[in-house]
Amino acid sequence: MKKIIAIFLSLLMLCSVMAMPASAAAEKHEKTPIIFIAGSSVDICDADGNVISTDFDVLTDDDEGDGITREAIIESAMNILLPFIMEGLPADKWDNYGDALYDELAPIWDDTQLGGDGNAKYGTGVSAKEIAKWDKITNSENRGSDGKFGLREYDFRYDWRLSPYDHVDRLHEYIKAVIKITKCDQVALVGRCLGGNVITAYLDVYGEEGLVKKVVYDEVMSNGSSAINDIFSGQIELNDKNIQAYLLASEHYGKQGEGLDLSGVNELVLELAERTYDLMAQVGAMDSAFGSVEELYARLYKAFIPAMLKATGIGTWASYWTSLCSKDFDTALNLIFGEEGSEERAEFAGLVEKLVYLRDNIVIPREKKGEENLYKQFEKNYGVQFAVIAGYGLPIPPLGVNSGDNGDITVDTANSSFGATVAGLFETLSDEYIAERVADGYGKYISPDKKIDASTCIFPETTWFLKNKHHDTMGGVIQISEYFTQYTNVTADSNNKNIGRFLMIDLEDHGYSNMTEENMADGPWIEGVETEPSIPTRLAALFRFLASVFAFLTQLMKGEFSLTIK
């Protein structure tokens, strides 16, 4: 008996000794080159390589002497509005006005729009020189020759307006070039914002070739965006608290050279709305047709936004359409491109075909549950390891029915995290819900501020949440991305650098630290909201918000690196 016990104890000690180095070596460095795919931060150029404006500064002055001033556009728009106002307001019919407004404004942004075939007009796109610069690096420089790869070693440049499927063949060649120069078998892909769409499309087409080992999705729209979905499908709802929070957050980050800039087309839309409001009041339409500011704006939306989404090119940019959900996709197509069978729809037939392909191959498959989900299929069939970075604690554009969602001022957290259960911007998860999750063994997934349940994410072990993370700042992103891609077995619960699942972003220097009950406070855009504003405040907020709608879309175009990387 003693001999048996001695043998048992010896085996136990041996297992303990063996377990110690195994535990220490559970996380080890691995040589994996990183290809970074940014959002809309790369300049779009004409066929000669000259930068064209996908922003709206074309309306800030008349430097070019072509007569395109804000005042001239407003005057034209108001002249168009007058004949249609009595038709549009009482019957809620805006087709004629929208068509006329589009015809008036579309020439200003003609070279930023995609054509009816879904391709760029006039040969616009990322300059050949820009692409050649990065292609040269992939063919001549092993930037990881020391065995370590950083986030910006290899950048894939692309025209972010197009369908992400338009880029997969060239990305495939790019990946093979990086593999050849680095003498590695696989790469890691890191996608920001719209860049995530390119990764998703690539895996759908080339994933079975096994060249991608790891993927990091950083605040991407690949899983949808409630704000874009609401804007494109016309689901309008005003909430004064959400409007105030959005404006306060924009003001806070605007002081640091980030966030929203109410200029260009934003001022144009503001002035158009104000003058339209005045005109309707003059003809008596206000008293006879409207019962609330919310209803007024819902009808103004139908007058302005669909026409301007097309005129500015935004509504034609296929990459944005991955942000819609399947149930609203056809509604958005009808709103922006006309009913199926109409002359307008026929004009955009090629583009619509590409959009429908996105719906069928990305949007619908990603909405499947469990193991049938698109990304779980990538993980299962191709062996891809995924990490997700999501910001929260900031408002999203306060235009649609989901405007109270928590987000990073651009993308809502539920979508950017690939399925977290997220409390509204001014709310927390209920005590009953938390108690139930804790009882079921999911307590570690509840954030200290009781706003996030990470257990419902598609990849709960490798999803990080950064509170007060503005979409256009990089706090924590570089560290998490490089760490996850360059080491094995990194999770939010287990990593040598103690980068927790829930992080706080410093509002001044954008650094990060693990969230605790001591540092988890909401940003000033939450604390500064008036719960019962006066009527003048509501009207002022309405028009200020109208001015910021397109500024939000501008930020989507610029992407995170617009301030620092060209």
Image: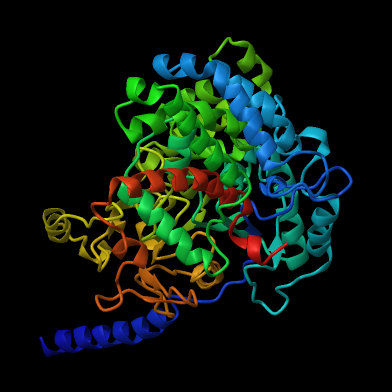
- Viewport quadrant of the N terminus: bottom left
Is residue 34 visible to the viewer in this orientation of the structure? no
What colouring does the structure picture have? rainbow
Q: In the picture shown, does residue 536 fall above or below 140?
A: above
Q: Residue at x 62, y 24 (%)?
A: 79
Q: Nearer the viewer, residue 562 or 95?
A: 95
Query: Observer-nearest residue: 10 or 302?
Result: 302
Quadrant containing the C terminus in the rendered view: bottom right
* Picture residue at 44% right of the left edge, 47% below the top: 397
Can the viewer see residue 139 in this picture? yes
Image coordinates for residue 139, horizontal then vertical, percent: 82, 61
Q: Residue furthest front?
A: 282
The one nearer the camera, 95 or 171, is 95
134 w.r.t. 166: above or below: below
Q: Please name whichever residue, 436 or 50, is drawn nearer the observer in this view of the structure.
A: 50
Residue 395 placement (x, y as % from top left)? 39, 54
* Residue 524 horizontal/vertical position (percent): 35, 67
Name the residue located 28 percent from the left edge and 76 percent from the top edge.
516
Number of residue marks:
0
Q: Is residue 480 left or right of residue 346?
A: left
Residue situated furthest right in the rendering: 48
Q: Give the vertical position of 204 relative to 488 (above or below).
A: above
Residue 333: horizontal and vertical position, in percent?
A: 53, 24
